[in-house]
Image (cartoon, rainbow, N blue to C red):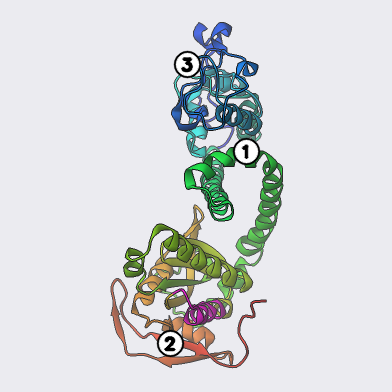
Amino acid sequence: MNADNAHPDTGLLAAAPSELPEAAFDESALEAAVPDDAVPNGAVPDDTVPADTVPDNAEPGNSAPATGTMSTDRLAARALEQRLLGGERKLRRREVAAGAGVSLLSARKLWRALGFPNLGDEDVAFTERDQAALNTIVDQVRTGKLTEEAAISVTRAIGQMTDRMVVWQIEALVEDMVHQQGVTDAVARKRLVDLLPSLVDALEEILVYSWRRQLNAGVQRLAVRAEAGLASSEEGREGDEDDAPLPLARGVGFADLVSYTSLSRRMNEKTLAQLVQRFENKCAEIISVGGGRLVKTVGDEVLYIAETPAACAEISLALSQAFNEDEILPQARVAMVWGRILSRLGDIYGPTVNLAARLTSLADPGTVLVDSMTAAALEKDERFVLVPRPAENVRGFGEILPLELQRGRGKGLVLD
């Protein structure tokens, strides 16, 4: 769907009603209320009292400030909110939709894609920056740069990725304060409100910088070099493979920690968090150095991809070796498969991914397994040795001939 054929009643370009309920523009009510999600822990603020009426003896963390006042913690949280949102919440959802010239339904589609909670007509929840952002998204459809489906998909990607990023960053900062300052988790979370104002600009700058670099790398991987990968994947194929119609050729790898479940049951929260962080940090470093991409981590398992069979093999061997030599982490089972995949929603899909997952469960601790087609793509490379293993009946694939991948000539990945 594009700007010309978007449905006039339900598409993103559906026009706002010519007249809105009078309540939507009741200026006397604009100052009345802030929605619950604007205040920590859902507390109900008293926004009608000027900030300078807070008594001089008010203490941080005071859970019961004098009637008609706001605690120091609440004032700090409100100031941080206004900075992050670009000002005070003065607009209701119908006003924002009308300002963008679209229906409330259209606006809600985009807000849901961004992961925002549902709000009522009377909630004064938006700022002028929200208005500008909605205009920006809608304009991409109006000008024909994006279809409605693409606009929603791209918006959802931004919402999901930034949501996860923010949770990660907050937990990292809280954990650091707990360790460095010797405070409790609850105290660290309160202090975070005072710390963030000094970090916001730097974090925003790094975010934009990283996004531009990652976008450039993604264009190279997913567009410029895609045909080269498909051409190299033809070797050893008969044309009737399950993954033949899929558009990208990649090396797909899994690394799975051995005995993670039993270990986690014996650990306290702090020790388990340190183990998980050590695992993810080590995986991210090795995969990055090897030129691959970490697709996702799920507890004790990591999924990664690389553009060539050799690059994925080097990463796989380096991961296996790193866990074998680590004094804290257990060994890992590792497997990789070279084949075709579908990349959607930041994840990857297809028979190649499924086979790599199945092979991981068959690998012995501290070893790397590949299938016969991957072995054929690597067998002429002196950096690798392939040792046949007995045939295995793999669910969904029938009988396959796995091979153990071992180090041949060369040093492998060098982590400096």
For residue 404, which numbered disc appears in the image?
Answer: 2
Image x and y of residue 381, in percent: 58, 89
Q: Which residue is mark 1?
A: 194
Query: Looking at the picture, does residue 205 appear above or below residue 121?
Result: below
**Please, what is the three-letter code of the amino acid marked with disc 3?**
Glu
Q: Is residue 99 depicted above or below 160 in this figure?
A: above
Foreground residue, 123 or 143?
123
- Callout 3 environment at 10 Å: few (<14), some (14 to 19), or many (20+)? some
Q: Is residue 275 above or below residue 231?
A: above
Q: Secondary structure at mark 3?
A: loop
The kind of secondary structure element at disc 1 is: helix
Q: Which residues are magenta?
A: 313-329
| Numbered disc in front, either 2 or 1 | 1
Q: Which residue is mark 3?
A: 122
Q: Position of residue 146 (x, y in %)?
A: 60, 40
The numbered mark, 2 or 3, whose residue comes first in the sequence reads 3
- At x 49%, y 68%, the residue is 279
User: Front-most of 268 and 207?
Assistant: 268
